[in-house]
Each structure stands twice: as structure tokens, then as C-alpha cells.
Image (tube, rainbow, N blue to C red):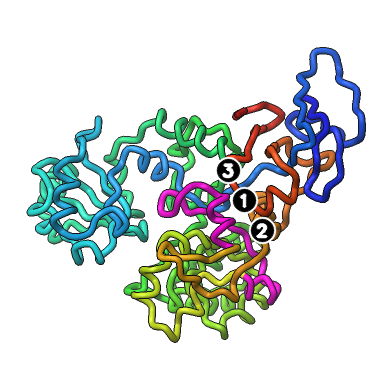
Amino acid sequence: MLIRRATLLDGAVADIRVGDTIDEVAQALTPDPGERVLDAAFGTVIPGLHDHHLHVYSAAAEQDSVRVGPAEVADAAALSSVLTAAVVGSDGWIRAVGYHEAVAGPLDRRVLDRLAPAVPVRVQHRSGVLWTVNSPGLAALGLDDHPDGRLRSADRTWTEALERRPAAVAEFSTRLARYGVTGVTDATPDLQPDDRPTGLRQRVHYLAPGKRILHDDGLDLDELTTWIAERHRAGEPVAVHCVTAAQLVVTIAALRDAGSHPADRIEHAAMVPQDCIADLVALGITVVTQPNFVAERGDQYRMDVPAAEQDQLWRLATLLAAGVPVALSTDAPFGASDPWAAMRAAVHRRTPGGAVLNPVERISGRRALTLFLGSAENPSRPRRIGPGEPGDLCLLAGSPQRVVDALDADLVAATIVGGAVVFER
């Protein structure tokens, strides 16, 4: 296809001939016979957005789930009311997501048995790493004797029994296309090649089997170092989930001992102590982080995290200034899947209650946009509009200045993957 009168992010106006890759970028290209012509009308054309960390199956399932976080449910009585009113899914389950202890305290099977109807119910903690399942649900999984019903998300011994709907994946892909997303990195740990989702129009990169989730109650420096070294000997990078300072410190120590790979990644880096920044620079490791959590959960952080440590939360500007390679993502469904909202959060860092959390970590709108323009293989380096680059583009109805000022998904006019239009407003 040929895109006419496209304004690039630097303000230049050009025509773009594109197939699976970009063939030509020049002024006044002549359409080939039978070639589709799309008039950008001087709107902005950028490389398609790449969400560098999300979970496809979970995000697809979230579309049919009940949300039970502090923003939706105030207390135990409200939680019981929401679960009781929920519609049982085609798989026989009620699936609830986004739970936090601020709603009704810690959950276990007995608490859920009191609060939920007598059908299989599973409630996911908003961290994404833990599910609580009631007694009917445990019976359906063959785990009647489980002591507390608290099951880790990455444990395939129980998750393999759950139904996955390809149609829901396609619906999620359509939503991403409306945002201008042309590529995603699925960060689901232990996702097997024959179990990868189908039905996505976006290009997909997978972190498994090199993705590792850490838990503070099971940190083992020697074991983590051995695992990293084995991955590196096989020529493969690692991606380590670090949401606490302890997890980050242990990961840095393990990488220092095992050696680093150019494509190694730290996922989230939710808490970064000041003295860890120089270590990240020395390792040359890429940090894939989610400033959208400031906008979605910032008020809870201000209550839960000691004031003296709040400057460590979701660092961005200080990492970039120090020279740490950084890319952004949404962590959908644990964060909202709109990357433009994540960009706005990086710029404003405003909590739901209106407070500004760590204003020194704010960045410009243009910089926030470029942090979604990296490739799966090199997340921190923005792609460009040029011959030989992937034919994955996003057309926006506005000038470059309007785009970086508004950072609004409603400006997305068309999304193109491999030279084919997958969304057109």
C-alpha cells in the first residue's frame, strides 16, 4: 500500500510505500497499479506501538472477569455482593481480578466460601502472582484437600486445567489495534511453544522460557545465579520480575556473578533504591517498567509504602538520565491495556486522588511515546520510518505536536501490520 502526505514525528512530510517492510519513503511517490492508497492528510505516522510486557491469555480472560479491586469494591460485604451477582462463565467459573487486601483483608478458601456463591470461584491478587480459590473451585481442580486455596499463577499443575477461549484473544487483539499497537511481548512465564495464543493480528514475542518471577519468601541467590548462567551458556537472555527492592538487589547480585547478556531485562523495577542505579548502568540491562501503575494505584502506594521509600517507586527520569536502557509497557491485564494512558502517567505521575507521586520522575510526552516504539529484540531503541524497517505503522489524526501533547488513543486513525490495515477509524 501507499500512504500519501504523512507527517513524520520530526515534522517532515513524505509518502510511504509499505508491505511486510517499508519499501520507500520519499516525496510524491506514484501509486503502482492496484496499489491501495491511504491519504494521511498530513496526519502523523509513527512506527506502530509495541507493548513490551503484557500477558495475552490473562488479558483476554480479563474482558469477561469481575473487577474486585479497591476502586470497585469497598469492603467484604461489597465483595460478597459482587461475587454473588456475577455471571458464571461458560467454563463454570466466576473469575475475579484486581483484588487487594485493602478490600477485605487476606483471602483464603474459607473466607471465599463465606463470601462467594457455592460455585467454582477464583480471585486473582492485583499483583498477578497469586489466586485464591474457593472449595468448589478446588474440588473442580482435584485439589479438595488444599489447605488454604492460595495458588501461584505460574504453577502449571493447576492452570493447565483451565479453559482458554481463542475468541477472547481475537477480541483483545482488536482492542490493541484500536490503540495503534502492532507488536507485543508476552511475559507469561513457562508458556510452552505449543500453548502460545493464536488469533492475534499483532506480531508477538515471548519471554518464556527465559522469564522468571521472584518471591521475597523464596529468594535464593545461588539458585538464581545458576539459572541465569545456564540460560546465558545456551546463548539466551533472561527477564527477571522484580517488584521489591529485595528482589532487585538479589537479581543484580546474580547477574554480576553469572555475567550479563545484551538482551537481559529487568521486568517492572517497581522499587529501585538509589544505590542500585549505578549497578543497572554497569550491567547494561534493560528495564521494562510501567508508570501506569502510578495513575492506577498511586494512592494505595502512598498508604502502603513508607514515606522515606516512596522516591524509589516506578523510577523513570532518573533511570534515563543515568543511562539505563528503558522501555515502557502496560502489564495488561494487571494494568490497563491502553499504552497512551501509560504515556500520560509517565508525563504527569498523577494518582487517582490527584496527588503527584515522585514529580522528579516525570518525562516529556515525546520521550514517553518513543519508549513504546522499540522493537521486541531491542526495546529501548525507538524504531524509525525508513526503508527496510517493519511495515508496522500507526496513523494519527493530528500533528506531531498535538500527538505528544495529548497522548490520546482517540487520535489513532489507522493501524497497519505488515502493510495490511488491521484497524481503521
Q: Does 84 sit above or below residue 417?
A: below
Pointer 1 residue: 407
Asked if disc 1 and disc 3 are in contact, CB closer than 8 Å, the reply is no
Residue 229: which quarter of the image? bottom right
Give the x, y percent position of residue 214. 41, 67
Q: CA distance from mark 3 to mark 2?
A: 14 Å
- The three-letter code of the residue at mark 1 reads Leu
Element on which disc 2 rests: helix
> Is 30 left or right of 425, judged from the image as shown?
right
Quadrant of the image containing the C terminus: top right
Asked if disc 2 and disc 1 are in contact, CB closer than 8 Å, the reply is yes
In this view of the protein, which residue sits in the foreground, 410 or 247? Answer: 410
Q: CA distance from mark 1 to mark 3?
A: 7 Å
Nearer-N-terminus badge (3/2): 2
| Disc number placed over residue 409 in the picture, else none | 3
Residue 44: which quarter of the image? top right
Element on which disc 3 rests: helix
Residue at 49%, 52% in the rendered image:
187
| Disc number placed over residue 365 in the picture, else none | 2
Highlighted magenta segment, given as a residue range: 317-346
Q: CA distance from mark 2 to mark 1?
A: 7 Å
In this view of the protein, which residue sits in the foreground, 186 or 371? Answer: 371
Q: In the rendered structure, does residue 326 fall within the stretch colored magenta? A: yes
Nearer-N-terminus badge (2/1): 2
- The three-letter code of the residue at mark 2 reads Gly
Give the x, y percent position of residue 371. 65, 57
